[in-house]
Amino acid sequence: MHFRPMLIVEETGDKSLMTYLMGMGTPIPIGVYIWLVEGASKNVLIDTGCSADYLSSIGFPSEQVSTQEEELEKVGLTADDIDVVILTHLHLDHAKDAGKFKNATFVVQKSELEFAANPHPIQAGWFVEVPQDRLQIVDGEEEVLEGIRVVHTPGHTPGGQSVLIETENGTIGLCGLCTIRENLYPPEELRQMGMRVITPGIHTNAMQAHDSLIKLLELSDQVIALHDASYKSVEKIP
């Protein structure tokens, strides 16, 4: 199995949105992806994305690079062919377009649904609803399909989850916290200071977010950062 990144939207954002208290005033591209798991027993998608127009309307300048339909068409699929959608969390840029996938079951953490129903004002308005009649509610670590596991990685949101797949190159983890590669693999000078990871810039609990990144690195042979713009030129991982 492998992950296939499909870039839908590219935002321009301040780097500190990704790296807590670092890179303030530095604009960077931030990718909004859907991720297809290829080689599984069913058609599995991770996150559903949203439109650039919507992100721009709420203050995140964005450009539409492609659509979910266009990206899936490249591999001979349609939105109706997707059987399972794993939602890393219920923020709008990851779940707003859930309605496009009319035949899919949506895998969501129990604690994420609970928080989204009554979010703290710090993230009010960021959460979206997903089809209630097609939910697969998980609580912690669970195998979704053979070779595909979700693990609870809170901190960005209380019920965030990451996805682990087994590949011929070992376990590859897709980080469910909003990160760029630098969060997971900091520059050497920071590592020499004892900083194993850089805490995500947006969080409900900074220490949980930090510890979730460490947990994911320990569970994986390679970790993919959810928003790193470099994956737009990558066909598949690994």
Image (cartoon, grey):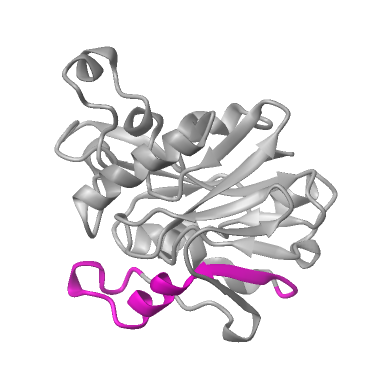
Q: Which residues are magenta?
A: 102-126
Q: Which residue is depicted at the point 54% across and 40% down? A: 173
**Most foreground residue, 188 or 16:** 188
Q: Left or right: 238 with respect to 17?
A: right
Q: Which residue is depicted at the point 37% across and 57% down?
A: 56
Question: Up-down: is 159 above or below 30?
Answer: below
Q: Measuring 45% from the left and 50% from the top, which residue is drawn there?
A: 176
Image label count: 0
In the image, residue 233 sits, relative to residue 156, either above or below, namely above
The foreground one among 234 and 1 is 1
Q: Residue at x 54, y 28 (%)?
A: 221
> Residue 209: image x %, image y %?
28, 49
Q: Could you tell me which quadrant the C terminus lies in?
A: top right
Q: Residue furthest bottom?
A: 133
Point out residue 32 in the picture as x, y percentages from the top left corner: 49, 48
Estimate the x, y position of residue 192 in percent, counting from the top left. 21, 14
Q: Is residue 228 visible?
A: no
Drawn side of residue 118 relative to residue 153, left or right: left
Q: Is residue 105 magenta?
A: yes
Quadrant in the rendering for residue 48: bottom right
Indicate whether residue 231 is drawn in magenta.
Answer: no
Q: Is residue 181 left or right of residue 220?
A: left
Mark yes or no: residue 211 visible. Answer: yes
